[in-house]
Amino acid sequence: MTVNGWLQIAFYSIALLLVTKPLGLYMLKVYDGSLTWLRPVERVLYRLAGIDPEEDQHWTRYAASMLIFSLVSMLLTYAVLRLQHLLPLNPQGLAAVRDRQAFETSASFTTNTNWQSYSGETTMSYFSQMTQLAFHNFMSAAAGVAVAVAFVRGIVRRSAGRLGNFWADLVRGTLYLFLPLSALLALLFVQQGVIQNFAHYVTVTTVEGAKQVLAMGPVASQEAIKQLGTNGGGFFNANSAHPFENPTPWTNFWQMLAIFAVSAGLTYTYGRMAKNQKHGWALWAAMYVLFIGGVATAYWAEARGNPIHAARGVDVVASATNPGGNMEGKEVRFGIANSALYATMTTDASCGCVNSMHDSYTPVGGLVPLVNMQFGELVYGGVGAGLYGMLVMVILTVFIAGLMVGRTPEYLGKKIQAREVQMATLYVLVFAGAVLTLSAIAAVTSAGLAGRNNLGPHGLSEIVYAFTSTAANNGSAFAGLTGSTYFYNTLLGLNTLIGRFAMQVPMLALAGFLAEKKIVPESAGTFPVTTPLFVVLLISVILIVSALTFLPALSLGPIVEHFLMQAGRLF
Amino acid sequence: MALTKRPLFDPPIVKQAVRDAFAKTVNLRHMVRNPVMFVVLVGSALTTLVLIRDIATGAGDVGFTLQIALWLWFTVVFANFAEAMAEGRGKAQAETLRKSRTQTTAKRLSNAHDRSSIEFVPGAMLRRGHVVLCTPGDMIPGDGEVIEGVASVDESAITGESAPVIRESGGDRSAVTGGTKVLSDFLVIRITANPGETFLDRMITLVEGAKRQKTPNEIALIILLSGLTIIFLFAVVTLQPFAIYSGGSVSIPILVSLLVCLIPTTIGGLLSAIGIAGMDRMIQHNVIAMSGRAVEAAGDVNTLLLDKTGTITLGNRQAVEFVPAPGVTRDYLADRAQLASLPDETPEGRSIVVLAKQFGLRGRPLSEGVRGHLELVAFSAATRMSGVNARGLELRKGAAEAIGHWLRQHGAETPPLLTTEVERIAKAGGTPLVVAERENGRARALGVIYLKDVVKGGMRERFGQLRAMGIRTVMITGDNQLTAAAIAAEAGVDDFLAEATPEDKMALIKREQGGGRLVAMTGDGTNDAPALAQADVAVAMNTGTQAAKEAGNLIDLDSNPTKLIEVVEIGKQLLITRGALTTFSIANDVAKYFAIIPAMFIATYPALQALNVMRLHSAQSAILASVIFNALIIIALIPLALRGVRYRPAAATSILRRNLLVYGVGGIIVPFIGIKAIDVLLVVLRMV
């Protein structure tokens, strides 16, 4: 680890802290409907869809609207991918996408996962990328924030289970938040050299005299929302390691900031909506501690490198001319600190874009992204999903430890009782059940084992990583696994749907139940949710709940691999 | 005391509890109600089947599997033992009560208005509406209402209070309880409850915990614990495929061991014991909870409504000062005040006599110092005065206005200086009592007696503690605003309701509840009943009317209104105990992972020995030690579950910090030490 590396991490942390409040205040206005400069556009959209944006929807209706919208848009994407050879903007003449691949991809993009078991440049036409994948990048992000905002309304309101209007939240989030911010970010990217064109692929002669085809496309526009909406689906297979997607340290910085910006801002929005800004900052702090802990671990592991390399005489010590450590799978222009930072962040935030290959990390370095996702994507987390994921953990924390102050548990004045606990438990259960069951199936079936790139514990890590990433709607890959098979396309596609909707519906139910409750005023006897003690407690609950669930499986994957590597064995 | 305090492990209770624990274990219908322990039961059965198979085929390590199976069964039995212990204590209390329900012979009156129309019938034959006569020495045969007569009744069988109480027809003292004894005079009682439905019967049922319903918070906690159990089921069941992938499968007893160690068996096993013990602790304080829900709600209370009289102040006002009028000596005033109060049997009157004694006026015969026969003038609502008349002397004491009126009638005036004094006393929250005399036709005011509400010692500190706990106290009084404000300030309550009518009280409760607060109150009169029914925690005094007792959800056998504060503390203690043991139980898992995971895969991946931070002897000793620790911790925590964790009133933040340190951090550390110790012991004893 170098001072320079830590300075860059500190620089990033300060930038994140600085964007939280302004963006949070802006989002508060977006979602309370007080921004009106695009009202005419809104009105046209509502009229076209026949929607009354003023209707205060009961949670069941809110959930139904969200599900119907997602289902219809997913089916549409499936159709377009299957028919892309008949559609325009296909200069390379790419063929129709195969059935399972189209299912998985449409599910994956609808759920904000963007798991890609295909190479964008050889599979997707510009039309598919722009009208479908980019569309989902916006919509799945806006839908995620909408559910989070609805969830918060459930906590702060007393409204007989009504949570606001899904359609209005979706439209406002898209028009006022994601579109303008993406436009701004895309311009920044273009300025730094990210490409934006509809050109044919270019064939060039390399320095060595070899012929190489350079893929082209409207990259910058897609890149912006890929980060802002924590989508993560790269235009190219190499994702943000590709020099056309992420050419410079500056684009790298903007990308990283964009990944956390909305989710960090939402903690501030939440503080405002709950009229408890200190609590909003307490959540921010808990997220930051988990984030920086992950960064430190990954950075330490990668900078330390592989003892086997060192034993063979490779110089793993950082110097002015040598990055040291483990540079396998990392881009030279980013180095170890920015790669570890990016890997931690992209898995904290359910983004899943990568600027280095996680498969090539040391076992402990690779364990960090895996564990991040297993926390449930709540370290800032996916846009919207991060906030409500964290709030579920807060509710569990309050429920478990709240009794210890001598009152039945209450959170911001709302009593946490059987129905709420049921939904919060279901949320945790669905995730653990999906990841563990599907990984276990893959670990003992020939179809599952066929996809591995490595044997032994590393192969198990690849399998567990794939199912964790899809259930967590992250979409990053451990890159070793060949996912474009019938088996994986089907199971992983299903897993993204489970990880999104089987968790969002209990969330909305929980919010609806909370919105039915009266608010108990705060007193000296109330469980404190703003103190450092609370932050420590919340972090402990998150660590213990996820560690207890996944540690047995992890001990046979990255953990044992780490000890074996120390003993000189590789896989 | 009717309900006795017992040692925690009373030998007869323990003996019975051991028997019950085994009976519960084989009762599947009972087991399935507790999902966590049911999973342990299934795991134990599964391990036993493997054991039988191993014995039959001669495969496997029979000695090891046998020990695992035994300790798994012990885990279930220990949890049931905890519950049986808690129930046993309740049952023992109930037995004491049941003894007082001896069969009585009742004197039933065939004509309610004719006390000679007696027929002797067994108490069990009485039905609602029957009328009985009770004379001194009679046991009252059932719950009822006095319709004629006044008598002193010994209610010690129910309340443990040895001083007899007065029961009379009409008003708030008309309710009598079966099993109590008439000491003097006679009572004609209309029976209000059929046999088996009496207060005593209901109390026995409650104390036994036979009809105990799970409380809302318990239900929610069980859902969470079940959820965690399912998650661990996923984690352990999927571990087998992962193990097979890694090239070595794990035996069923070991998988079951891991599962049982991970699922929250500690809190799962102790949960119902904690609930029963909470109600039991109420009983130790002579409070009967009509439901566990009421105990839980007590912990949640935000606002306490406290009646001034008897709760905040001593029952009655006391004379604390004589303020003589100009031209009158203090001694003379004291002398006259004492004389005027001699026939006054009210506590106020007596306190005047007591105060006068401090001026050297010893008790004297009524006739001393006055000529002729002393005639008493009783207090009446019309004159609002009382006093004495002797030959040539009239003494009066009463409210300032009433005396002023009397003086004017006799051609005199209240001196202005005295009026100032009267106002001063009233403003300070006291009651000014003016004393006047008319001797030989000449009337004059002698001075003022300062009657003061005396706030009970220690109440200020009590209210301070409640405030720190976030509980608001509201004093309810019939006094006027001025007096109420002064007493409220002196006692240190947060708010007061003056000139309170039952309607005002009801409105206050509704207003508090409308703001999301939970309200607790005490009451004894029939006019308290609606408010009691509305309040979230309603402590009815046992001396109160039937209507009040029906409306309350807690009944205080000592009829001590101050006990409301203790009720709240017991409620909080129950909730804290539940939370502390849940936290402890979950925190325990960390150490168990470090014991079991390396042990499970020692054959497949010896490198995982790096995780064996406790340096446990072998795979078998590690797994066995974890299972044994997991079982023994239930037994070790039974006293804590029954007694409740230590509770001192404080703000939530400091309570949380302390409990987290003890049960959270402690919960992580203790098993590391415990498992290691058991491991060493197993090796020493050559059990592995």
Image: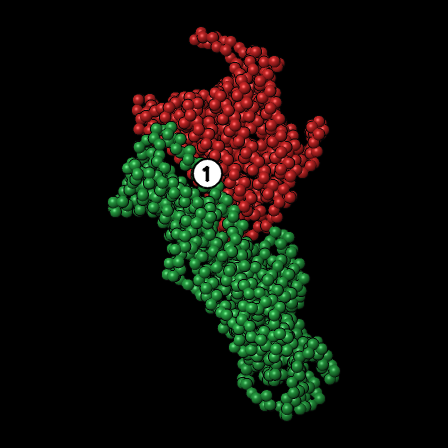
Classify residue B254 by image quadrant. Answer: top left
Residue corresponding to mark 1: B231
What residue type is disc 1 on? Ile
Question: What is chain A's hue in the picture?
Answer: red
B591 over A76 or under it: above or below: below
Query: Is A399 in front, or is B51?
Result: B51
For image coordinates 46% across by 27% down, the residue present is A466
Pick the residue in front: B587 or A325.
Answer: B587
Kind of element beneath mark 1: helix
Q: Looking at the picture, how far across and down is residue A262, in whole percent? A: 56, 32
Q: Is residue A45 visible?
A: yes
Q: Please identify which colour was used for chain B in the image.
A: green
Q: Is residue A74 left or right of residue B576?
A: right
The residue located at (54%, 59%) in the rendering is B290
- Residue extending farthest bottom: B372
Q: Please say whether residue B454 is visible from this viewpoint.
A: no
Q: In the rendered view, how is the structure colored? A: by chain
Across and down, in percent, residue B28 comes to: 44, 47
Left or right, residue B59 beside residue A207:
left
Q: Quadrant of residue B615?
A: top left
> Percent from the top left, x then y, of residue A224?
57, 24
Position of the C terminus of chain A, as image quadrant, is top left
Q: Chain of mark 1?
A: B
Q: Residue drawn 61% across and 13% down?
A: A86
Above or below, B676 relative to B202: above
Residue sitting at x 51%, y 29%: A495
Lateral position of residue B515 relative to residue B215, left or right = right
